[in-house]
Image (cartoon, rainbow, N blue to C red):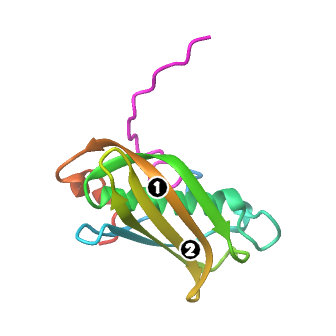
Amino acid sequence: MAVKELTLLDDDNCFACGLENPVGLKLKFSLDPKKGTAVSTTVIADHFNGWKGAVHGGIITTLLDEIMVYACTSSGWFTVTGTIEVKFHKPVPTGELLVISGRIEENRGRSIRTSATLEFQGNVLASAKAVLIPVKYEEGSMNRIAGRLIQ
């Protein structure tokens, strides 16, 4: 069976940031193109538990992955994740305000090294490093994602 080629299309239905996804996280971002950074705040509902009161590790990984993608988007690069390494330092509580931060560490042209943290009350509960693969550069990328930006 042949693998079907996919065209990467943003239909605003992404689980992490899509505003049209009825069960998604609907993350919004504050971006700094000069620093290559992204920040988001969110409260994760109990139906995304792993254990009672603790966010599932897959959701934590999604949050960290998405913030690193948006750090790249801040500089005009639309990317996909090549590799990701997540460290879970402490349980992440549901129902509490979380701060997710990501940054570009190094742009190598064909790959971009990034890092991210997830914090609660100033304490890092999870962190990640990733290599993102640029798929498209777009001047004015902020216009395309305007609905997902914190005004």
Q: Quadrant of residue 87?
A: bottom right
Question: What quarter of the picture does the N terminus occupy?
Answer: top right
Q: Is residue 138 left or right of residue 84?
A: left
The residue mark sitting in front, 2 or 1, is 2
Residue where numbered disc 1 is placed: 17
Q: Of 59 and 47, which appears nearest the observer?
A: 59
Position of 32 compared to 49: left or right? left
Q: Amino acid at mark 1?
A: Cys
Residue 115, given in percent of the width and then of the height, sits at 47, 66
What residue did someone put label 2 on?
A: 118
Q: Is residue 20 magenta?
A: yes
Regarding mark 2 in the picture, which secondary structure is present there?
strand
Q: Which residues are magenta?
A: 1-21
Please tell me which residue is depicted at 50% across the width and 56% down the height of the picture.
Answer: 130
Residue 119 horizontal/vertical position (percent)? 57, 79
Which residue is situated farthest in the bottom direction here? 121
Locate the C terminus and report the quarter of the image it occupies: bottom left
With respect to residue 50, does 7 lie above or below?
A: above
User: Is residue 94 in view?
Assistant: yes
| Residue 148 in sight in this render | no
Chief secondary structure of the magenta span?
loop
Q: Is residue 58 above or below residue 53?
A: above
